[in-house]
Image (cartoon, helix red, strand yellow):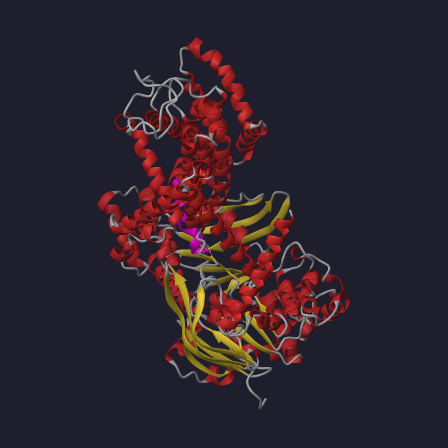
Amino acid sequence: MSEEPLVKIRGIKLEGRSDETWSPIINGVDLTLARGEVLGLIGESGAGKSTLGLAAMGYTRDGVRISEGTVEFDGIDLLSASAATKRDLLGKRIAYVAQSAAASFNPAHKLIDQHIEGPVQHGVNDRSASEEDGIELYRKLRLPNPEEIGFRYPHQVSGGQLQRAMTAMAMSCRPDLIIFDEPTTALDVTTQIEVLASIRDIVEQYNTAAIYITHDLAVVAQMADRIKVLLKGDEVETADTRTMLSAPTQEYTKSLWAVRSFERPQKPAVATGAVPVISVQNVDAAYGKVPVLYDVSFDMHSGRTVAVVGESGSGKSTTARCITGLLPPTAGQIMLDGEALPPDYRKRSKDQLRQVQMIYQMADTALNPRMSIGQIIARPVQFYLGLTGAEKRKRVDALLEQIELEPTEYYNRLPSELSGGQKQRIGIARALAAEPKFIICDEVTSALDQLVAEGILRLLARLQDQLSLSYMFITHDLATVKAIADEVVVMKDGRVIEQGQKDEMFRPPHHAYTDLLLSSVPEMDPDWLTNLLAERGVDNIGDAAVDKM
Amino acid sequence: MIWFVAALLGMAAIAWVFRFAGQTVTGNAPRFRDMPYGVAYGYVLGTVVVLWLAWAYMQGRSEDTAIANKFFFLRIAIEGFIIFAIAAWLFRILGRTVGTAWSRKMFRSMPLTASFGILTILIYAVLTVFSGLIAPHGQEEILQGVAANVPAGTDPNYPFGTDQIGRDMLSRLIYGAQNTVGIAFLTTVLAFLLGGTLGFTAAVFGGWLDQILSRAVDVLMAIPSLIFALLLMTIASVWAPQLGIPLTVFMILIIAIIDSTRVFRLTRAVGQTIVVMDYIEAAKLRGEGHGYLVFKEILPNATAPLLAEFGLRFCFVFLTIAALSFLGVGIQPPLADWGTMVRDLGNLIAFAEYAPLAASVPLLAAGAIALLTVAVNFVVDWMLHKSSGLKE
């Protein structure tokens, strides 16, 4: 380790092009990476993590340029290197693993055919040798049926497996450096843990250096030797993982670390005999002929939050679709204040529709991009409450103040002129405008940065206390559940597996699946993954463990 | 043949030398170092073509009429190209300095092709609306005491000459804008009203209504459109005198219906991608009616692709009308229209080698069609580029 560092970036400045002008993305950052070292890059979206990661390969996306600084890889100056030199390095000595494996694989070719492209092209191995090596890598990454899985097409394997196949592909030439760009962000917790364990293993085995880009602190704590924190294109601090976690020096880093501290006290149990706002009773549902929900029942009371947790495909959102009436249940019923709601939303009265509102995961697609903020919020006000003119405007202003946005500033803006967190607030205001009793929050914070997400959670909690709203909170993030829920419902494969008060749910004994779910959530302890693997064994985590149930 | 191969090989050699010289002179700068051989060859090929054009242009200006006639149209094309480019450039500068903040911003990011397109469309629009005021003579007026078939450029009173029965060509070209462009515009609007409404309805309702409409459109689209239009126009030309309705009305309706099938397919596809958005679901759950959904939530988000399609569809309609008129079932004489003018004067093109000015008369009408088509396509390309959010 005494020799020259593998990657040496000095004073790099990157600029992005928008509307014919260049604006800075990274303002002079240094980065040094030794052989075999894993560096974690963290920061909010827009902090320039990915841009910096790509710059380490001497590459920039379209519309981005390097204006200053140097990038050296193993003594080669990447910025002035010829195209031929770079061609020789990329893929062979530097590899890249993208966030969405599903979008990065070519759907028309088998995995193994895409895997061997690198080694064959670079003359590292011939075709059959690389195929054998690919199978070996699949085995090392603990993919099921390593001999056969390569001969499948990308759509025939699951997301987590695809992400591991992509890591295997990056490894195919045994590179000196791999750049991981949020490789587990799109995955469920139980799948994520498997991918994390495999990546960590293989990087250690081949002594590969890596830059690991993520916004999840708990994940980076497991993976990295050192952590570098970025904020709006500037470096905040760099330190050893343990030092960084135990004693961050900068205010910003401390605030990132403290995000997960928000937790609402548990409310007392609801009095027996109280009429729930919404009661889901023995609901079965199906998409066409495929059944997706089996006998789902739970109650939601006024002023309480029920968190519905489970992996993707467990039926959380389908339950919400049954409650809103978008998907009429095949059996069972939905009760509002003790009265049965018509199964189809088209048959419900305007008042029934008003009582049940929804906040969506992707604020981008939930707000009409051609309507101003004022128009978006004013529509339900006018539609349900019949307010017009000055009265309507007054109500919209009041709603904007409730979600902590200045009315005069935001009334005429379009959604595209708002940040992600602000858009989500507009979604909340639109739901509030109907003056409902019950709001479904469908993964409302999962697309947001942690600091912003916490702001949204606090806002929702405050609104609940003021207006005694009832929330159904759909999420796969257990930290969010801890923060906001009163009751928890755990779903798997369309069934409710366990439900109860939050305090009870976070205390053993659990249903085996709840246990697995809880134990798969990464913690801010750098030894967490190591300990968990030691405790459970590699074959008892993630999807493998789920399959055994 | 041998000369051709020799020229290609010669250029290949020059390309290699060019790249090598570039590398040596600039001290192996990245620009030349990373230049693929194909790009170097492209530079050389481009230079050769430009040089040939320059040589041909000089031939076109030659004193010897025999040689000048041969290159007459190339010369006009080059001069036209330069004039249009300068006009577009000036127009863009004008747009950048005059107007609201919004329009100035739009002109700032506009490519030259789009500004040329907008300028041309504006000129056509003015001609269409004010043709009665601008044209020196009536479109049906047979000028007294003037010979028929006066070539363009010979009589200053009739700059574009006269046609086969002594009508002023300039006036007929201007009125042609009104007839051809005006009718095409009306037809396109009708096609969009019909196809757009049905397309969005199919997208929002789905189910059996969508099936019926889509299959009906499939049937209509299966018949080649020009043949179908020709067939229907033949039938209509029998009905029109009996019913006392001008044939032009039938033509507008027939083309509008045939073209609305294409519009239907597009609006349905665009509508379907918008209908699955969460904000549509939110509006549905609010209990909004279908009218609100289509006009307030979906339509504003579909304007960019629809406007682009409008421009393109306008060109097709316009060409269909010109084609029908050329075939004799479209706009009826004595109304001036560019398609009919090309047909009536087409045989003059045979004189191109000896009297290019006389041959240019039918080409003027054809050129008017081509120019508008190119202009509209430039604007459409630019709008598509903007709406797709592509950078560079």
* Image location (x, y in percent) of residue A304: 42, 59
Count of numbered tags? 0
Q: Nearer the viewer, residue B82 or A361?
A: B82
Task: Find the residue positioned furthest to the left.
Answer: A390
The answer to which image quadrant residue B228 occupies is top right
| Residue A353 visible, this orientation | yes
Q: Nearer the viewer, residue A486 or A372?
A: A372
Task: Find the residue positioned furthest to the top.
Answer: B242
Task: Find the residue positioned furthest to the front.
Answer: B64
Q: Quadrant of the C terminus of chain A?
A: bottom right
Q: Is residue B2 above or below residue B358?
A: below
Q: Nearer the viewer, residue A481 or A219?
A: A219
A343 is within the stretch colored magenta:
no
Q: Is residue A352 above or below residue A236?
A: above
* Image location (x, y in percent) of residue B183: 39, 26
Give the side of residue B261 with respect to residue B172, left or right: right
| Residue B298 visible, this orientation | no
Give the side of residue A342 with respect to residue B170, left or right: right
* Image location (x, y in percent) of residue B361: 41, 28
Give the side of residue A410 with respect to residue A16, left or right: left
Q: Quadrant of the N terminus of chain A?
A: bottom right
Q: Is residue A256 above or below residue A159?
A: below
* Image location (x, y in percent) of residue A337: 43, 48
Residue at x 58%, y 43% (from the top left corner): A330
The answer to which image quadrant residue B224 occupies is top right
Q: Which residues are magenta?
A: A347-369
